[in-house]
Image (tube, rainbow, N blue to C red):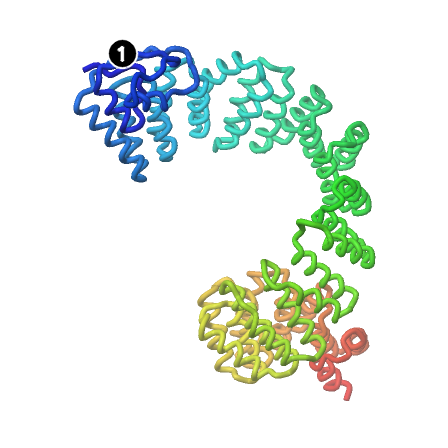
Amino acid sequence: MIFPTRILALPLILMLAACANTPQRSATDEPASDSSQHGRLEQIAPEPRLDLPDVELTDRLMYGFLLGDIAAQRGRPELAAQAYLDLARTTRDPRVARRAAQLTFEAHQYDQSLEAFKLWQELEPTSPLAKQMLVSLLLSGGKLDEARPLVIEMLAAEPQKGRAFMSLYGLLARVQDKAAALDWLTEVAQPYPEVAEAHWALAQTAITAGKQEVALAEANKSLELKPDWDLAVMLAAQQTQHNDPQRAVAMLSRFLKAHPERNEVRLFYARMLLEQKQYQPARDQFAKLLEQRPGSAELAFAIAMISLQLGELDRAEQELRQALSGKGGDNDTLRFYLGQLYEAKQDWPAALQQYREIQGGDRLYAARLRIAYLQNKQGELQAARKTLAQTEAKEDAQRVQLLMVDAQFLREAGQYAESFQTLMRGLKNFPEQPELLYQAALLADRLDKHEDFERLIRKLIKIEPDNAHAYNALGYGWLARNIRIPEALALVEKAYRLAPDDAAIIDSMGWGYYRSGQLDKSLEFLRRAYAANPDPEIAAHLGEVLWVKGEREAAQKVWRASEQAHPDNTLLRDVIHKFLP
């Protein structure tokens, strides 16, 4: 039995139809009977007549076709792909190779797919799709040398060279060796120096290869060849911005004067101005875009955010409300930022109203936290804690944050024991959460629960052996109680090695040397800490060491300045009263 050359071996019904010795028909022939109509369904757009082999339809081939089709129908793409690839190897029929290529590609089998497309391209060399797909596979697999002759041939035959180079860039983006991709494209593009898209693709590839000078030169050449091309001017401006941001801005400004209708370039220009913190000009450009799209909530929102950055709160409020009245905007985000704006204005009721309007979506959690914060700020501790308790957390990070905020509210209210118990309850669910351990340990120390303090801190150090603040907390805790001074200083020194620029740790170093009687070293560290952060606790330490060294006028100067800035700080006040009763 001869395998009919006109029947495509795809569906099972065709295989059954192929059992008959039907004569070869052209694509325009009408079917002779219902049974042959299935062959008609598989006919595709007229193509050049293929050189088709005559292959005997053996039981083995029939089994292969049945296996492939049934596997495809039953969701077994790998089995279907392998079956058709075996058939393509055996029959060397371009139609079977085409089907094998399709199935292996859909099954994400790179090696088999590459073999199938090579076979299809060999058997049907006039098929542009076979060649294009083979090039795509070769490039995505980094097989640049194999792809080169095919690409050179395709470019030579392609009348629209620009479109071809744009497509090539998209394929090269998947190549892992970016430097090799750039060298390859440079060679392929060499015969086409007047094609702007070739230089654009070279510039983009050079960016990914880290060759900024090459990228700038190629981007400028692309713009020179095609000065009215949006993509060229944006790429050239983007590359120019690295070394000459003002020139990049001027480049876009000139382009927009000649082409004021190019809104994509205007949006790119506005964002570049924003990156350069040229807020007023950026807002003007967003405003021009809004004139073209008066109902755009996104543009009105961008303008409002710039007004907020400029501190123009009234204008920002008007712009946010304009955005809120538009269609298609993210109203929850707009309300959230309106709430932020009212907080900046210290209009707590208005801010709360905006946050309470948010009833769902991604902003709900953050809005609930802001509600609790404002309630606590207004002295409504119980209401704030109730808000936190009723806030739904979607992940453990949010659950931990709610616990931390609740404990913070209690700590700020002076309810240290309750704050500690809140954190300890949280540790039952999250026993190794570092921040919970750290904050609980600090509260334990404050409550004179020294055993709990040391146990919690040591557990934190075990979990995070490079946590500088954990070593500092344990060491400073002993220094504050004036016990185990050598061990305490060793811990603080380890913290300092891990975080040498942290003002709190530098302060601990100074205090450790003070406890060790090394006053000169103590002053060196305490002055550094105070210069980095004029915190009242650091001021108290610095003043005390200065006083003990006999520099009493300097000590009083430090204390007075800190007391003026922090009149309610208990620790500072206690130290001052200790030496100036």
The type of residue carrying mark 1 is Pro
Q: How far across and down, in percent of the image, does residue 404 sit?
A: 57, 71
In which quadrant of the rendered view does residue 288 lie?
top right
Tell me the quarter of the image containing the C terminus.
bottom right
**Residue at horizontal 76 percent and vertical 39 percent from the top:** 292
Taking the image as drawn, is residue 548 in sight? no
In which quadrant of the rendered view does residue 380 lie?
bottom right
Which residue position is annotated with label 1?
23
Q: How far across and down, in percent of the image, does residue 172 sit?
A: 51, 28
Q: 447 or 8: which is nearer to us?
A: 8
**Residue at horizontal 72 percent and vertical 62 percent from the top:** 340
Tell me the quarter of the image containing the N terminus.
top left
Q: How far across and down, in percent of the image, does residue 33 sit?
A: 29, 19
**Residue at horizontal 61 percent and vertical 64 percent from the top:** 359
Query: Disc 1 on helix, strand or loop?
Result: loop
Q: 83 or 21: which is nearer to us?
A: 21
- Of all residues shown, which one is farthest toward the front? 33
Callout 1 crowding tier (Cα within 10 Å): few <14, some 14–19, many ≥20: few
Q: Is residue 276 above or below residue 141?
A: below
Q: Is residue 211 left or right of residue 464?
A: right
Q: 362 or 408: which is nearer to us?
A: 362
In which quadrant of the rendered view does residue 36 lie?
top left
Q: 75 or 477: which is nearer to us?
A: 75
Q: Is residue 150 left or right of residue 267?
A: left
Q: Is residue 76 above or below residue 567?
A: above
Count of number-bearing discs: 1
**Residue at horizontal 72 percent and vertical 79 percent from the top:** 569
Q: Is residue 210 above or below residue 516?
A: above
Taking the image as drawn, is residue 114 in sight? yes
Q: How far across and down, in percent of the image, does residue 21 sit?
A: 22, 14
